[in-house]
Amino acid sequence: MSDLLNIVILAAGQGKRMNSKLPKVLQPISQKPMLQHVIETAKKLTPHKLIVVYGHGGEQVQSCMNEVFPNEITWALQDKQLGTGHALKCALPHLDKIGTTLVLYGDVPLISADTLKALQNKLNNNLVMLSDLMTNPTGYGRVVRDATNNIFAIVEEKDANDVEKKIQEVNTGFYAFSNNHLEKWLNSLSNENAQGEYYLTDVVAMAYQDKLSVESITAPNAYEVMGINNKLQLEELERIHQINQANQLLVSGATLIDKKRIDIRGNVSVGQDCTIDVNCVFEGTVSLGNNVSIGAGCVLKNVTIADNVTIKPYSILEDASVDSGAQVGPYARLRPGAKLAQNTHVGNFVEIKKSTVGVGSKVNHLTYIGDSEIGSGVNIGAGTVTCNYDGKNKFKTTIGDNVFIGSGSMLVAPVEIGNGALIGAGSVVTKNAPENELTVARAKQITVGGWLKKKKGNN
Ligand code: UD1
Ligand code: CA
């Protein structure tokens, strides 16, 4: 086995059947372009060179992947799709003279690093292919063996005779090659076949003719070699990928009420005794401490949740952090910059943005808190609004410790409420409220004597 590893990802296909302006290899699996999945897997083998063969109109593919993997990808243009052999030939100038080349596909996203390593390890100077046994091999290249069971050739469906068509051992399209043979083989390909294409598969027969043994290993999971040509297959692999991730989460000790009803579009880590109810979506990086419970239908994106926290159903949290013992929801929304301290309670229809809520404070009902700093032991009454925006600029609200804000209060920022203050319900607070005092800012209640009687008399 040679040291220098080259990985070539063929990604020049157009994908017309996607019915999309987005190139096929940028179609997402768990919100990530399928080509990105392949590149991430390839990188696990730390290749000396990572080459992507892109096609006509592939600038979008290039710019998108260069953003994710700056300076890591060598691009090889295949301006006309003349076949898989021609595609690999386009990468030839970038390959090391000696070493190993693995061939992967931008539209076969769930290949595993373990399978690729197995191909690499099996390589003994010549060629190893990844094959599979299929009860219905229609459409695939068939693996043809000689009388002593040595691999002799791969015959494409369209070129196969009736006997060959019955062969159930198929070519998945993944290979490991020794670079020292590749140049000669790729330069000898011809396109005299049923499809008029330069078939990469023809190198198998060339190796056999050169008396070089061709080895094969089989794919451990069918999904690893499944390609995507349409939205139906995209959805199938999305579900398989989600089940794989859910399985990983279960193995790491999370309790999932239904592993078929969780979607992970990023990374989730869990402590001990975490329970996730049905229909939750996790995006970005989500970290759950010990003994965390996530209710049904929650969406969590880039959040950190400490121990003993309960997130009740249908809450939406993004770029937020929740400290231990807190309770959030149902129907709560934590927007970017929301920071809840220990033992806080945030209840239904409460929106919190770019604000800290101190230890043990409660914001339980129908409230908007934005650009605010709330101390500890505070109770924010139902229907409170921090009026943080004048149409042009945002302003800060500061609420001290042990404050009680009466229901239906408008706190017009910039404003400060001192420690221990009590704000009467329905106040519109436009000036700072002193500490340890009752402040009421609303029109005085009056009763207009006889007004109703008079009105009736006029009728
Ligand atoms: C290929 C194999 C076949 C195998 C099957 C597995 C050949 C000749 N046949 O057939 O034995 O069973 O894969 O799925 O290789 N591509 C390019 N440039 C090209 C042609 C293709 O980049 O000029 C890329 C495509 O984007 C695609 C992949 O290579 O991702 C496979 O090409 P495709 O033409 O679909 O090959 P198959 O006919 O499926
Ligand atoms: Ca194909």
Image (spheres, rainbow, N blue to C red):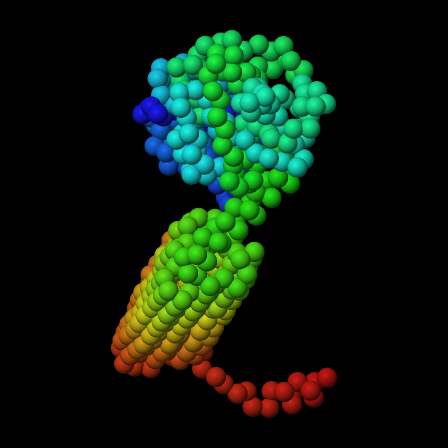
For residue 404, say whether it is visible. Answer: yes
Left or right of 350 in this view: 435: left
Left or right of 142 in this view: 406: left
The residue at the point 49 percent across, 57 percent down is 299
Quarter holding residue 116: top left
Query: Where does the image place residue 333, in percent across and percent down from the top left?
Result: 46, 62
- In this picture, is 369 found above or below 134? below
In the rendered image, the residue lying farthest to the front is 148
Left or right of 276 in this view: 21: right
For residue 109, say whether it is visible. Answer: no
The residue at the point 41 percent across, 61 percent down is 253
- In this picture, is 262 found above or below 229? below
Relative to the observer, which residue lies in front, 318 or 431?
Answer: 318
Query: Where does the image place residue 432, in percent across and percent down from the top left?
Result: 30, 70
Query: Where does the image place residue 410, in percent across and percent down from the top left?
Result: 42, 70
The residue at the point 39 percent across, 55 percent down is 269
- Could you tell me which quadrant the N terminus lies in? top left
Relative to the observer, which residue lies in front, 148 or 437?
Answer: 148
Query: Where does the image place residue 250, in percent across and percent down from the top left?
Result: 46, 58
The residue at the point 51 percent across, 40 percent down is 220
- Could you tell me which quadrant the C terminus lies in? bottom right
Relative to the observer, which residue lies in front, 402 or 21?
Answer: 21
Quarter holding residue 74: top left
